[in-house]
Image (cartoon, rainbow, N blue to C red):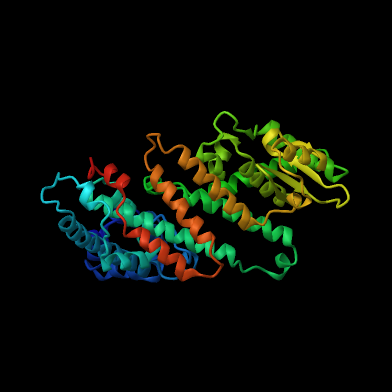
Amino acid sequence: MLDALPIDVLNQILRFLMDDGTSVGRISSCSSNLHDYLCGQNSSDLWRDLVQRRWTKRRPDADAIQNYRSEYLRRHEIDHKVMQILKEMESDLRELLGLKEENDMVDGSSHINQAYNNPSLNHLLSLRSDVVDILILQANKRTRLFGFLAARTLQIIHLIECYYEWDNITNMKISDEIMSDPHRLNSIALERYAILLCGIQRTPMQLLDKDTDIALNIVTQLDQIADDCRRRIQIQPPGTVMEKIAIVNDVLANQYGFSGNESDYYNYKNSLLFCTLQSKKSIPITLCTLYACVCTRLGLHAHLVGLPGHVVIGLHENEDNPIFIDVFNQCKLLSIHDCQDICNSLNISWSTTFLAPLPARNVFQRMLNNLANCHVREVRQAHLFLGELYFQQQLFASINGQQPGLSRNGIEIISQYSFKLSPELLRYYSLLS
């Protein structure tokens, strides 16, 4: 009977069964014609659709997939294994925490700081991006201990991915063309660090939103701002660098309305580029990072200048007359004398070393420090997962303080974190009163 169905109807049935590889396999065994259709070379588009609809999180090498049917079977087997491991971990953790009844709570005083060191967890962590979709699915079901384990494992895998991105930035492999342009090299690293910071400050529940791609969102918005600047430059071609800068300043300050967030200066979201692009308000270092990223797209060599207590933009197109811009204050142009006045207002002796460009990694460290300051200030607020965000900031502040290339040490730091139970996540899953 299935053999007689029109191809379009059969495809609809198969797409309805996209989460059930076993049923798809059974259909292929109904007849030789169905087997040839489902397993033959002409079925590539069908299996690609099945893979992409069931597993939305792309693997790093997704573009290299040659056989989507084999990929479907591989991922389906992994999902089955993940479910087995989570059930095993749930049973072990239930015994460790003394949870006898389904609605029992974790005893925070005696159990919350116990390490949970199950060898199966390491196997899950090794699979990384391949298990993200199944973990999101199970964590979103909110089934108490099982959901907690899925969410916690997802969180740890995300932090490991963040670590590998940090390691890739600090040991960036780039072309000779970019290597010969230190300004561009620093700008590329600066943008990647800013995106990474947004990833580090994702709560476990934000990770469950599988439709939010922070990196893509940030890059798309920066591209849009740069395109708006480019259109203005084409309409009224500037004769000098200063005229070009004036257009960029007008687009950012007036068209988009980016400005300093004086009324809520210590909100931790001010340190996150993703949030700044949404709210249009932030602190100096994040606004300057945004400004530098836009300038890079326009061929302008902008860098961050770390004055004491304040960060501004520096442009050395003309070494004899450097330009400084206070993005926090409506992109106001500053002279060296103005920079000196900022130091004088803080009773700090002036030094020309303050005007040196900040390396991207130093900017990242300052952002991490700002986050710590904000989290400590907000500690008394009833902000869910604030403790998690603070701890994640501390992890990467420790990692960033190492020498580049110490991958093993970074993974060890995150692994130690993974074996600590999360009070906030336990409370979210109704396991901790």
Residue visible at 87% across and 44% down? 240
Residue visible at 39% across and 59% down? 157
Q: Quadrant of residue 334?
A: top right
Instruction: Examine the rendered structure and indicate whether residue 381 appears above or below residue 107.
Output: above
Across and down, in percent, residue 312 comes to: 71, 43
Across and down, in percent, residue 300 comes to: 76, 50
Instruction: Examine the rendered structure and indicate whether residue 362 appears above or below residue 334.
Output: below
**Can residue 83 be seen from the camera position used here?**
yes
Furthest-left residue in view? Answer: 100
Instruction: Examine the rendered structure and indicate whether residue 31 appears above or below residue 257.
Output: below
**Can residue 15 be seen from the camera position used here?**
no
Residue visible at 22% across and 45% down? 431
56 on left or right of 232: left
Furthest-top residue in view? Answer: 263
In-front residue for pair 244/259 = 259
Q: Quadrant of residue 339?
A: top right
Across and down, in percent, residue 55 comes to: 38, 57
In-front residue for pair 288/258 = 288
Instruction: Examine the rendered structure and indicate whether residue 169 appears above or below residue 222.
Output: below
1 on left or right of 195: left
In-front residue for pair 426/12 = 426
How many numbered discs, if any?
A: 0
Across and down, in percent, residue 264 comes to: 54, 31
414 on left or right of 322: left
Residue visible at 23% across and 68% down? 29
